Image: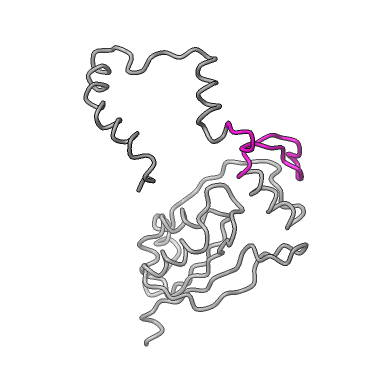
Amino acid sequence: MYPEYMSPSLEKVIQTRNKRFELAKSGKPVFPQMSAEEREEVLNKFHPDYKSDARRKIRIGPNKGEIITTEVADMLESHSSAAVGSAYVASERVPICRLDSIESRYLAPEANLFIKIDTQGFEWQVLDGANETLKRAHGVLCELSLVPLYDGQRLWRDIVDRLDDEGFMLWALQKGFTDSSTGQSLQVDGIFLRRHVLRE
């Protein structure tokens, strides 16, 4: 799970666990207090977000000039440059329901169910909330991202493997989102069919 170079640090954590636990129970500080300057020095030395190349300005879009982590900047720019007008401009809270919690209101027990998932990087969470609904489905159409376009999203390999474990075969790919300036495919739509349905 952890890279080999972390083994000495992990061993030290294990060896000092009981001592730290006893200090915490007694109300004594587990670690020495650091001044603001000391904290800044440690962060600059060890924290990845504090490295000189870890943050940069966004070059395009409505947040142009804002300094954020390089990974997020790359992600936002790849989407904005490939689809002008798709950049983030605001956020809004909306209610979210799990498919499993509402499917009985809309689907007859004998319905032949085909699920379409196009949720802008939220596909994994939709699947998390559809365990029982998926068992009834004969097919799924799911948007698959080939590169990171949304913060925290799962990419195509994870989705394909998960639906394969659920008993679905990747049947077809449909053209989705392409960067017109480079020709790079960023997203495709995957059609998945239930294996036992294909055998019938």
Q: How is the image coloured?
A: one colour
Vertical arrangement, residue 56 with respect to residue 80, above or below:
above
The residue closer to the viewer here, 84 or 106, is 84
Residue 122, percent from left and from top: 52, 53
Q: Residue at x 75, y 45 (%)?
A: 61
Residue 16, percent from left and from top: 26, 26
Left or right: 131 with respect to 36? left
Vertical arrangement, residue 49 with respect to residue 102, above or below:
above
Q: Quadrant of residue 26?
A: top left
Left or right: 162 with respect to 184? left
The residue closer to the viewer here, 97 or 195, is 195
Is residue 3 inside the magenta stretch? no
**Number of dots carrying numbers:** 0
Residue 155, percent from left and from top: 52, 59
Q: Residue at x 50, y 57 (%)?
A: 123
Is residue 69 inside the magenta stretch? yes
Vertical arrangement, residue 116 with respect to residue 120, above or below:
below
The residue closer to the viewer here, 79 or 40, is 40
Vertical arrangement, residue 90 with respect to residue 130, above or below:
above
Q: Residue at x 41, y 55 (%)?
A: 128
Q: Quadrant of the C terminus?
A: bottom left
The furthest residue to the bottom: 200
- Per the rendered image, the range of residues in magenta is 50-71
Residue 82, percent from left and from top: 73, 57
Q: Residue at x 51, y 32 (%)?
A: 47
